[in-house]
Amino acid sequence: MDFVVVVLVLGVVVAVIAGPLRPGRAREEDLALEAERAELEAAKEAKYREIRDADLDHRTGKLSDEDYRAIDKELRGQAIEILKEIDRLGGDKPAVGR
């Protein structure tokens, strides 16, 4: 009986230690990273579009100079945070399937 318990414990230990070494796990992590990167890239493009829209609204007179400066500062700050997150993930690498 003791032998069976030792073999089971050793089996569990080997499985836990070898878990991160399995190729499927690395692929899943890569896919999760790529999905996060793709989401951030989409957020970046959306933020750039908001900045362009605010600029157009300012040029057409829909926004005063003061309002435009406040909105532009906020939007650019948000864009910088998105860019920092993209850099944290490793830059502008293409998303899976591109």
Image: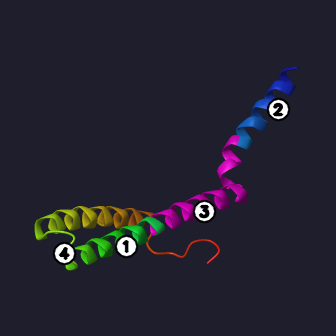
Vertically, is 57 above or below 71?
Answer: below
Amino acid type at circle 1 is Arg
Marks 2 and 1, how far apart in space?
61 Å
Q: Horizontally, is 85 left or right of 93 in the view?
A: left
Q: Give the percent coordinates (x, y) of residue 63.
A: 19, 69
- Looking at the image, which residue is at 52% across and 60% down? 36
Amino acid type at circle 3 is Asp
* Circle 1: element type: helix
Query: What's the magenta region?
Result: 16-41
* Circle 4: element type: loop
* Circle 3: element type: helix
| 23 is within the stretch colored magenta | yes
- Looking at the image, which residue is at 34% across and 69% down? 50
- Looking at the image, which residue is at 21% across and 74% down? 58
Q: What residue is pinned by disc 4? A: 61
Q: Earlier in the sequence, mark 2 or mark 4?
A: 2
Q: Horizontally, is 33 left or right of 71 in the view?
A: right
Amino acid type at circle 2 is Val
Q: Give the percent coordinates (x, y) of residue 12.
A: 75, 36
Q: Earlier in the sequence, mark 2 or mark 1?
A: 2
Amino acid type at circle 4 is Gly
| 21 is within the stretch colored magenta | yes
What is the total number of numbered labels drawn onto the structure image?
4
Q: Earlier in the sequence, mark 2 or mark 3?
A: 2
Disc 2 crowd, CA 10 A, few/some/many (<14, 14-19, 20+): few
Marks 2 and 4, how far apart in space?
77 Å
Q: Predominant secondary structure in magenta?
A: helix
* Between 25 and 33, the one nearer to me in the picture: 33
Which quarter of the figure has residue 81?
bottom left
Q: Horizontally, is 83 left or right of 89 in the view?
A: left
Q: What residue is pinned by disc 2? A: 7
* Dots 1, 3 in contact, CB < 8 A: no
